[in-house]
Amino acid sequence: MALIDTDLSFDPRDPYFPVPGAPGVRWALQVFTTVDGYGIDAERTRVREADRVHVHADGYALFGRQRTVDVGEVDVEVSRDSGVLEWVVNVRHEEPIKAVKLLLTGLPEAALAAGWWAPNTGRGWAHGVRGQRFQLEYPGPDWATPWVAAGDGEVVLSVRDPMVRRQILHVHQPPYAPLPIVELVHVPCATARSTTYRMPPVRLRLGATERTADADLDDHLSFVEGAHGLVPWSERPDVPAWLRDIALVVTLHGQHWTGYVFNTFAQMAEALRFVSRHIDPRAVLAYVPGWEGRYYYRYPQYRPGPDLGGADGFAALASTAHRLGVRLMPMFGGHGVNVVQYPSWERSVLRNDTDRYAELLNRPDWDGDRVGEGDQVFLNPGEPTFREHLVESISAAVRDFGVDAAFLDTLGYWFNDPRHEVVDGYRRLAAELQRRHPGLVLATEGWWDALSAVFPLSQQWFGADRDLRKPRVLTRYARTTGHLAEGTPGPGSTGVHEKGFVHRPADVEREGHIPVVGIADDTLPCHADEVAAICAWAQDHAPK
């Protein structure tokens, strides 16, 4: 959760230093350990200026500079090359380092007032317009790759990090600051926490145009491709030919957490027969959440729910889908489990960054008593036994029912678990499934640069704009579709999801985005004409 409303209630009195070739722009540095936060001790700092600025400090000061700390050192070099400023930061402290923050002030005011945007920011939208405080966090729904620009590209800020680590952009103007402060916070992986740390290079381009900003983004994406193994969509070995032709995702809602059944497997099969009369079924991917029985309550036990028709009913659904030419994708929880269903959860539960407690999060109110349920926890696929459980569960669905794809819920969320690095777990999970089942498509909720290297298909974050400002950050590598919680035709039931009722957005063609239609209990009995129209629209806008 972005804590944008928390802040220091006093001036930390950081010393600021010059930027070569950028008059008026200054920078400062803060270092955070597991114990406290520190600024540079100005009294024990040496600054060398030439074609580059080198700052060396032999100690720290506690924020506010009431007391200095005679431990560690800081080395920062700021260089300029071809119009790009680059910070290389090395820090040492006797306490484990958990974050490093670069602070910038004096950036062009007009660009900052026009607002900031990432490649995946919605077209026509900007963050921080007219000085409004905001925060972006990578990786996450608002920041898909650590590259951001202000104005029309007059300011471009990026991080060249070869790993997936938390980057935070926070822009504000506290009462003690004469100008806005742009903060770039880098958070090391807790799995490798140490008393010494080298921050990945931070790059700042000033005076850019829209054209040079675009070129800078392409240069950034080239770096990302090499760092994370991203492959263009047209060349991906994990994308079978049938996926390239998918024009519509049909969400067949199964059983709600409370036990309410939206569709039995037989009703799902009938829905696919209806859809296939209005669109080429070979262009349809059927997504089945709640197929295991009570949605989320049964997590992570993934076998066909008896109230929906059991194994025989699901086998009949799979047979109908394949006979029609429809591809089938059941849903699995990438993190979430019910502790009642998985007694060994504590071995795999996500831990906070200091490994002192379990991260208890995402507790929806499934039954409507206005209180989050108490037995839902998130586990880490980086932990080998839980990852193996997921592999075996998905493999059983492929073996027994011939499913074509597997959707893994919530893997777009990033956690700094000190015991197991989550992205490494995602990569190992995908690699083992692809080894066992060549051609199996893996999809997940949410997307960002390195995640798109693992999953060629994702659900767009719920509520996030699909009209991306620079769509190539996604479409060069992967495809996305509508979220599970997009409402069904009619009153907008979100089916098994906890959102209740949400009106379905109008169909608008978006590059790289596959439209979706959900089928709940009343959808075909009451809104068949609307479903047929959506199918026809999707057919007309099918990939060429």
Image: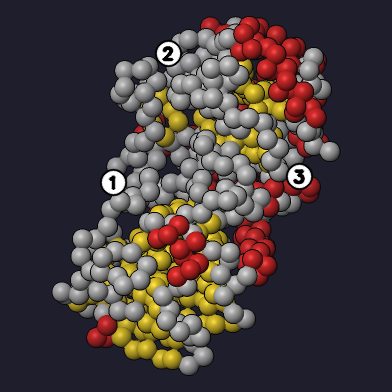
In three-dimensional space, the C-alpha distance between marks 3 and 1, rounded to whole angstroms, equals: 41 Å
Local SS, label 3: loop
Depth check, mark 3 against mark 2: the one in front is 2
Name the amino acid type tagged 3. Answer: Pro
Q: Earlier in the sequence, mark 3 or mark 1?
A: 3
Name the residue at the left extreme: 66
In three-dimensional space, the C-alpha distance between marks 2 and 1, rounded to whole angstroms, equals: 33 Å
Q: Nearer the viewer, residue 248 or 190?
A: 248
Neighbor class of circle 1 (other Cα within 10 Å; few <14, some 14-19, many 20+) is few
Residue that appears at 51% across and 45% down: 141
In three-dimensional space, the C-alpha distance between marks 3 and 2, rounded to whole angstroms, equals: 40 Å
Expressed as whole percent of the image width and height from the top left, the position of residue 521 reads 57, 10
Q: Is residue 389 visible?
A: no
**Which residue in the protein does label 2 denote?**
258
In the rendered image, the vertical position of residue 491 relative to residue 186, given as above or below: above
Name the amino acid type tagged 1. Answer: Arg
Expressed as whole percent of the image width and height from the top left, the position of residue 4 reads 34, 52
**Which residue in the protein does label 1 denote?**
356
Neighbor class of circle 3 (other Cα within 10 Å; few <14, some 14-19, many 20+) is few
In the rendered image, the vertical position of residue 49 relative to residue 148, given as above or below: below
Exactly how many numbered labels are in the figure? 3
Name the amino acid type tagged 2. Answer: Thr
Local SS, label 1: loop
Local SS, label 2: loop
Residue that appears at 65% across and 70% down: 212
